[in-house]
Amino acid sequence: GVNLSVTLNFATTGLNALDTGTVASSTYYGIYFIYNPTTNVWGCIASLNTTKPTVLPAGFTAYALMGVVGTDGSAHIVAGFNQFARTGSFQQITIFTGHASSASLISQSVAAAVPPIAKSLSGILGTTNGASTGLDAGVASDGCGTGAQPVNPSTTSFIAMGSFRDLQLTTAQTVYWSGGASNMTMYVTGYTI
């Protein structure tokens, strides 16, 4: 195996940098290990394309996607981003707050927090109205309840929140949720590609 430690520079292009252009806001970058078999040099590249790098430096012919990282509205890497294997975690990203209750599963875009190639996500669902009973909250992979995970809230003061983990995404960037309380809130805290 190869032990690779690289600093990726989003301020320039080429080896150990962006493949083309300048860093964009509110988007996702595929992070790739790249290899030049002629010189036996390994490196890294970031690309807007999460399927394969748009451009490889001269002589580099092999690549492998190692992760995907998002940028915020100011074109900075999402706050607190950490990746281990194919799982990224970060400071919670708000998907919605103050949503009315829903007894049945409804779809919700999570595109603000997970890339299109994400296979699963983790997060928090609950209410800020202080309800600890009747919350009946949960998430699922689709409107039929596939992979449903009940969210068991922990109540403190006026907040009842519970976490969900590794919920499979059967439709890109979409989850389904329900909850029996007003002022429902959802955050995403990570994803796996």
Image (spheres, grey):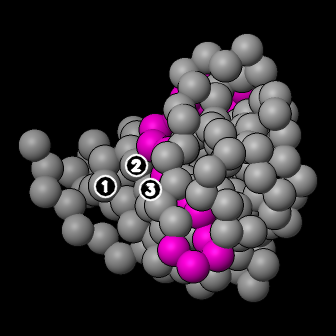
Left or right: 99 in relation to 17: right
Q: Are marks 1 and 2 in contact (CB under 8 Å)?
A: yes
Q: Which residue is mark 1?
A: 84
Q: Which residue is mark 3?
A: 88
Amino acid type at image mark 2: Thr
Amino acid type at image mark 3: Gly
Q: Mark yes or no: residue 14 visible.
A: no
Amino acid type at image mark 1: Phe
Which residue is drawn at the image coordinates 78% and 30% (left, top)?
Answer: 105
Q: Is residue 169 magenta?
A: yes
Quadrant (top left/top right/bottom left/bottom right) for the N terminus: top left
Q: CA distance from mark 1 to mark 2?
A: 5 Å
Between 76 and 108, the one nearer to me in the picture: 108
Q: Which residue is mark 2?
A: 87
The majority secondary structure of the magenta stretch comes to strand
Mark 2, other Cα within 10 Å: few <14 / some 14–19 / many ≥20: some
Left or right: 43 in relation to 101: left
The answer to which image quadrant residue 177 occupies is top right
Mark 1, other Cα within 10 Å: few <14 / some 14–19 / many ≥20: few
Q: Are marks 3 and 2 in contact (CB under 8 Å)?
A: yes
Label 1: which secondary element: strand
Q: Is residue 145 magenta?
A: no
Q: Mark yes or no: residue 100 visible.
A: yes
Which residue is drawn at the image coordinates 14% and 50% (left, top)?
Answer: 2
Label 3: which secondary element: strand
